[in-house]
Amino acid sequence: MSLRILHFSDVHLPAPPGAFRTPEILHPKRLLALLNFLLRRGSKYADALQKLHGLRDFLVREPVDYILYTGDTLNFGLKREFMDAAPRLAGILALARRGALAVPGNHDLYTGASPVHHRQHFTPRPSGDLPEAATPTGYPLVRWLGEEAVAIAVNSSRPRFAFWDSSGRVPDLELDALARLLDRPEIAVRRHVFVMTHYPFDDHGFFHGLRNSRQLLALLQNRDNLVLLHGHNHQPYARRIPGTSLRLYCAGSLSKAGAESFWLFDLLGDSLHPRRGAWRNARFILQDDPAP
């Protein structure tokens, strides 16, 4: 039986009118980020809503069984952003014929108050097909993908006070739970196990990457059925991690001008056929050349 799975990330929807008329914007990190957004960053994502609509149109033309989303729907983690973006994202995820799974990005959990908004608007209740596997953080989340595959999501994003610190970390509780999940017989026998989080698995940069990436990769290596999915870096790529059999796919950003992308995976038995989506002539298409 074949499956189609779409992975996208980093939409960065524009803030709705009135989003900045709140004391939340006075947080030092947000003030500096807003200045950067107005002077430089914002122009790259000015058409993010159009690109999200483009993804919706693509999914109508090219239906998929499952959607896997690795976060950064927002820019500042403001309440009005959540209120406006949550139904838009939910509408996209609902287009998957059989289910979806999502994790937050660092711009979603931007400051200390953002996780409360995220739980209220994006994850009001535990989700996943193995709720007993989740730790007190709410993760890992598991989604069965037919009979031969499964997706497991861990949350590497958390609020950081300093504006220069956009690093992530997977909590130790989630790492231990992930190891137990990967050893469960009903998961270990699956031909494709997608492990997903926002931050790159192999980037241990202290202020921008995943601080405990070495610990995470040590847990994952020597498992031949894993496919690693992430966002955060706004350029798409696919590669194998040196010294391992791990395949890694960065979805890049759905909406960054000139680099719009996603991954589409066609699964048939042991075969995994990835193709990259690209924005051409105001619509998303699939590139002809397969990924490595």
Image (spheres, grey):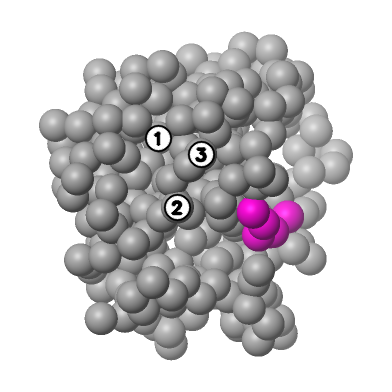
| Residue positioned 53% across, 29% down in the render | 218
Compared to residue 37, the image places residue 272 above or below, namely below
* Structural crowding at the residue carrying mark 3, measured as other residues with C-alpha within 10 Å and reported as few (<14), some (14–19) or many (≥20): some
Marks 2 and 1: in contact by CB < 8 Å?
A: no
Distance from Cα at disc 1 to Cα at disc 2: 19 Å
* Structural crowding at the residue carrying mark 1, measured as other residues with C-alpha within 10 Å and reported as few (<14), some (14–19) or many (≥20): many
- Residue on which the image places disc 1: 154
Kind of residue indicated by mark 3 = Gln
Compared to residue 205, the image places residue 144 above or below, namely below
Q: Main secondary structure of the magenta part?
A: strand
* Structural crowding at the residue carrying mark 2, measured as other residues with C-alpha within 10 Å and reported as few (<14), some (14–19) or many (≥20): some
Residue 208 location, quadrant: top right
| Residue positioned 79% across, 66% down in the render | 258
Marks 3 and 2: in contact by CB < 8 Å?
A: no
Instruction: Say left or right for 79 vs 100.
Output: right
- Residue on which the image places disc 2: 224
- Residue on which the image places disc 3: 221
Q: Say if the magenta span includes residue 236.
A: yes
| Of pointers 1 and 3, the one earlier in the residue sequence | 1
| Of pointers 1 and 2, the one earlier in the residue sequence | 1
